[in-house]
């Protein structure tokens, strides 16, 4: 799943709890939390570590030191645009969440509209992770004046209007991923996997230094696949929890900069800090299925995204261009409708590499590369993440400057995409 976060240094933070008086919203599906008593104070789990026997230590439940409501909570729109710290899509890409130096906001993608916002008085949120469209969110403080400590993950229930739990660690949290059955917390060099129902620690993984909090999890029911950096530069680790298998893939020579999974976890797209090539792997056996080229110059890749059929791959970078590539490893390899996919592929625009295929072995590798079939130009230097829209052949682009774009690409002719929609979601206005 594609995430942008602006991390800041740890600053003093008084323990605070959410105000219980703001409104819940019917736009969000409710998650059954009947196993959690209404009078249960938010639990705090100490950082997991190996005990003397080498096993996983059990989490310690510690009552919150301050059960009083947060007096700084504001349930009203602010008058000026906040500073954006974080933006990310939810698991089905139908919504996106933003963290600001004043709180967080939730938006619908199609049609575009703000669903609700939670503003705090001088309380920044640096990470917001949705759980599809339900009332559960994972929050981490951020900005110059964090609402929560940077080493805690706050589990927020928007129906109860309060945090129902918190996971505490010895170092800053770099990322959070949610499934309906798992909570994944990413630290600088460790990843912790918890059961969602009881917050029991089920797995911990050591990684190479991971300041971006890179991690991806599958979201298809019955299949849990987790991808994270390995212990070597350029290596990714794939955990198949259903089959209890671990696969290491040497994806690149340089350090891993970004990766993405298909919803079922069978395909993995990776890129390195060079940002020129994107590679597609089969996560089951680690085989390289395809390699596509974003460009010749170095670039910082901000996001990768598969289409729902895995027929297309979108890439955004600091060069200011969003690329869409055609993939060979699509539904035909995933056990889907092979005839339908084949017909689409026959009509799709040919990659520029195909016309040079007869020169393989003669021309340098650069000229044999597969290039994008569609592009959209943005402001160079700004940070954007991209995903595929629910409308056919569309992409949705979000920027840390508050921009929302919906664009359409032509799968047959390719070329420049057509802009269908633009909004500034940070524009000061009343919620819809």
Image (tube, helix red, strand yellow):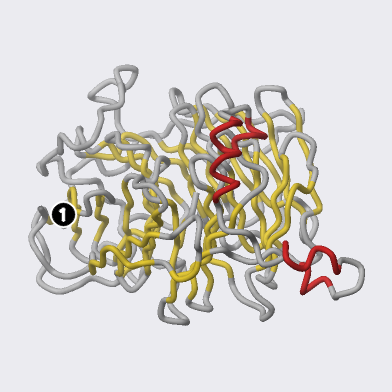
Left or right: residue 139 versus residue 341 is left
Q: Residue at 45% of width from left, 41% of height from top?
A: 167
Residue assigned mark 1 = 73
Q: Is residue 171 visible?
A: no
Question: In this rendering, would 52 be left or right of 385?
Answer: right
Classify 10 Å Cα crowding around label 1: few (below 14), some (14-19), many (20 and above). many
Which residue appears at 15% of the width and 38% of the height?
25
When the figure is inspected, residue 272 is found, relative to residue 16, above or below; the finding is: below
**At numbered mark 1, what does the secondary structure look like: helix, strand or loop?**
strand
Residue placed at 34% from the left, 42% from the top?
137
> In the image, is residue 215 above or below residue 374?
above
| Residue lying at 36% horizontally and 43% vertically, measured from the top left | 130
Q: Where in the figure is residue 346, as x and y percent of width and height? A: 60, 47
Q: Nearer the viewer, residue 351 or 218?
A: 351
Where does residue 398 sit, x and y in percent of width and height?
37, 63
In the rendered image, which quarter is residue 240 located in?
top right
């Amino acid at each position: 799943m594609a995430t942008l976060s602006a991390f800041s240094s740890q600053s003093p933070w008084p323990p605070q709890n959410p105000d219980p008086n703001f409104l819940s919203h019917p736009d969000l599906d409710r998650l059954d939390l009947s196993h959690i008593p209404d009078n249960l104070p938010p639990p705090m789990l100490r950082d997991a570590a190996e005990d003397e026997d080498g096993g996983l230590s059990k989490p310690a439940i510690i009552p919150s030191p301050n059960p009083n409501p947060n007096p700084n909570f504001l349930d009203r729109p602010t008058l000026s645009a906040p500073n954006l710290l974080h933006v990310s899509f939810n698991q089905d890409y139908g919504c996106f969440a933003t963290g600001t130096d004043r709180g967080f906001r939730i938006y619908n993608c199609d049609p575009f509209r703000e669903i609700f916002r939670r503003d705090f008085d001088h309380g920044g949120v640096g990470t917001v992770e949705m759980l599809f469209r339900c009332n559960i969110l994972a929050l981490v403080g951020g900005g110059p004046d964090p609402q929560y400590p940077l080493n805690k993950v706050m589990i927020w229930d928007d129906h109860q209007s309060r945090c129902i739990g918190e996971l505490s660690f010895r170092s800053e949290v770099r990322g959070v991923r949610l499934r309906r059955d798992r909570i994944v917390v990413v630290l600088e060099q460790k990843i912790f996997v918890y059961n969602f129902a009881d917050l029991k620690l089920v797995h911990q993984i050591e990684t190479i230094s991971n300041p971006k909090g890179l991690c991806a999890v599958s979201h298809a029911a019955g299949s849990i696949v987790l991808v994270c950096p390995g212990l070597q530069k350029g290596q990714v680790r794939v955990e198949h929890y259903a089959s209890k298998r671990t696969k290491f893939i040497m994806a690149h020579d340089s350090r891993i900069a970004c990766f993405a999974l298909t919803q079922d976890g069978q395909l993995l797209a990776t890129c390195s800090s060079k940002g020129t090539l994107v590679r597609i792997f089969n996560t089951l056996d680690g085989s390289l299925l395809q390699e596509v080229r974003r460009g010749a110059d170095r670039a910082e890749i901000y996001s990768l995204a598969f289409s729902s059929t895995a027929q297309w791959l979108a890439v955004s970078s600091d060069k200011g261009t969003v690329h869409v590539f055609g993939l060979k490893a699509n539904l035909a390899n995933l056990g889907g409708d092979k005839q339908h996919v084949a017909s689409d592929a026959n009509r799709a625009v040919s990659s520029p590499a195909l016309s040079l295929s007869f020169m393989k072995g003669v021309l340098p590798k650069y000229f044999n590369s597969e290039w994008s079939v569609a592009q959209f130009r943005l402001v160079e230097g700004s940070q954007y993440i991209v995903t595929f829209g629910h409308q056919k052949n569309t992409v949705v682009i979000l920027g840390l400057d508050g921009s929302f774009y919906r664009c359409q690409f032509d799968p047959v002719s390719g070329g420049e995409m057509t802009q269908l929609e633009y909004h500034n979601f940070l524009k000061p206005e009343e919620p819809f």
